[in-house]
Image: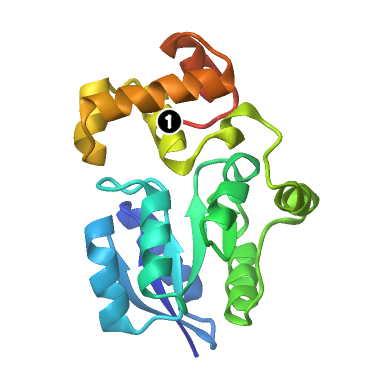
Amino acid sequence: MTKIFIADDHVLIREGLKKLLKDEFDLTIVGEARAASEILEGIKNSGCDILILDLALPDKPGLDVLKEVKAIYPNVRVLILSTYPEDRFAIRTLKAGADGYLSKDSAAEELVVALRRIANGRKYFSDNISSDLAQAIRMGIGGLPHELLSDREFEVLCMIASGKSISDIAGELNLSVSTVNTHRVHILEKMRMETNAQLMRYALEYKLVD
């Protein structure tokens, strides 16, 4: 029996996943979390095999959560289940240690397939991006400007694009304002842009923010 822990701040998503998997003989839900602060303790108490992780938790960036889980519980497999488009985020999450990536728009049957494949020690990404993933990993780079950013820079980019101020970003990421400003400068340099407005237009165009 594969034991699954769900981390998502939306109760409808958590309840929907439990309903979806309740009749699967080899998959069982053993716990759930609404925020990043609950995940590590939940994994410890539940002894889960797979973590289903939303990238948009309210109290910590999803990539940070992913790295933390993999550092402390390397044997726990992680399936990202997100509203963010797979072709923009899957490569970054794979490099950070994810075992699979699935959009919340995917069919219910695909989730079951993904969980079983991951439980068997394999990676799961949809067929339409598999070749792109393989090529990007071999090259060690992404094909778009935002894929040149570090994970922290990418988080700052998404927060800027969401309309958050530098001071708000600093508070949420527990960084100094000067450090966030430095990240912003590096982001603009790497993406060859000059203003926050350009960053926001780019993020909206490539669906990096809702």
Where 38 sits versus 156, above or below?
below
Residue at point 77% right, 56% down? 127
Instruction: Please identify the quarter of the rendering in which residue 18 is found.
Output: bottom left
Q: Viewed as shown, does residue 49 lie left or right of 165?
A: right
Structure colour scheme: rainbow
Residue furthest bottom as drawn: 1
Residue 105 in view: no
Where 49 sits versus 106, above or below?
below
Instruction: Please identify the quarter of the rendering in which residue 110 is found.
Output: bottom right
**Amino acid type assigned to the residue bearing label 1 in the image:** Cys
Residue 30 in view: yes
Where 195 sits versus 158, above or below?
above
Q: Viewed as shown, does residue 65 lie left or right of 199?
A: left
Residue at point 45% right, 9% down? 195
How would you rate the neighbour count of disc 1 (Cα within 10 Å): few for under 14, some for 14-19, many for 20 or more? Answer: some
Instruction: Please identify the quarter of the rendering in which residue 196 is found.
Output: top left
Give x and y (percent) for residue 204.
52, 22
For the C terminus, which image quadrant? Answer: top left
Residue, disc 1: 158
Q: How many marks?
A: 1
Residue at point 29% right, 29% down? 179
Residue at point 54% right, 88% down? 25
Q: Identify the element where label 1 is drawn.
A: helix
Give x and y (percent) for residue 140.
69, 47
Give x and y (percent) for residue 98.
53, 61
Residue nearer the viewer, 39 or 178: 178
Where 81 sits versus 160, above or below?
below
Give x and y (percent) for residue 173.
26, 39
